[in-house]
Image: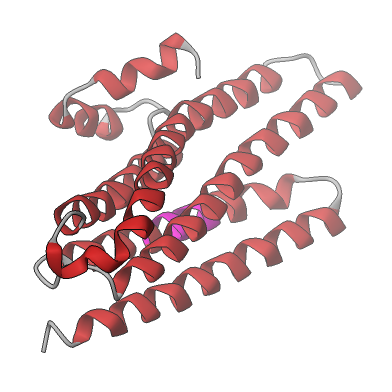
Amino acid sequence: MTDGNSDVLDLSVKKFIQAVAAKTPTPGGGSVAGVVGALAVALGEMSLVFTSGKKKFAAHQAFYDHLAPRLAKARAMFLDLVGDDMAAYSLYQDAGRRDEGPERDEAVQLALAAAIDVPRQGAKLALAVLEDFAALADKCSPYLISDLVAGAALAVAMARLCDYNVRINVPNVTDKAAAQDVRRSSAADVAHAEELFRRIDQAAQAYMP
């Protein structure tokens, strides 16, 4: 992440929202997706830290100790995607400013590849987080299970946001077969995310009649 792109993460919540609402291309949907993913993980982390160390759940302490650094790393990776998305858009803008010709076409395709790669990374990360949340669901304090489910819902939303960003870009990829493969993989990730959410939600239903 470049210094310029990292500045957006130093904004207050209020100012970040204002920046998204402003008539500027970034931060936009991709940046918001990264923040949503980070918030999803944060809710899972809160569920974990309030459960870890409790005598009632002592049998799972090794699991909690293993999961805590994984979630912290995932949260940091989601925040990195905020800047990565902004950098990819900047690359696309720069490519579009070039004179018409083969070099411009190649630069645009490279920029598109970057613009697609960022949300694909985000979707895979969301799936990894949902897998961890599913493993935590039956080991989570009932007082925190609603926060865990809320985090899982945000992770699914993040996967959907990533899919939207993929779908808007793949029609411009010249390699149509590759573009179709990416589109199918992205759709499959959304379906997998929703399946994982159902597992987490089901585990929570006992505490939320």
Name above or below for residue 12 compared with residue 3: below
What's the magenta bit mostly, secondary-structure-wise? helix
Q: Residue at x 69, y 36 (%)?
A: 112
Name above or below for residue 136 compared with residue 109: below
Q: Residue at x 71, y 52 (%)?
A: 171
Left or right of residue 99, residue 137 in this image: left
Q: Residue at x 56, y 54 (%)?
A: 124
Q: Position of residue 186 (x, y in %)?
A: 62, 61
Q: Which residues are magenta?
A: 157-164
Q: Is residue 28 magenta?
A: no
Q: Pick the residue in front: 119 or 78.
A: 78
Q: Position of residue 82 (x, y in %)?
A: 43, 32
Name above or below for residue 145 compared with residue 52: below
Q: Position of residue 193 (x, y in %)?
A: 48, 68
Give the image quarter of residue 74.
Answer: top left
Q: Position of residue 15 (x, y in %)?
A: 17, 25
Q: Pick the residue in front: 22 or 163.
A: 163
> Does residue 135 appear in this view?
yes
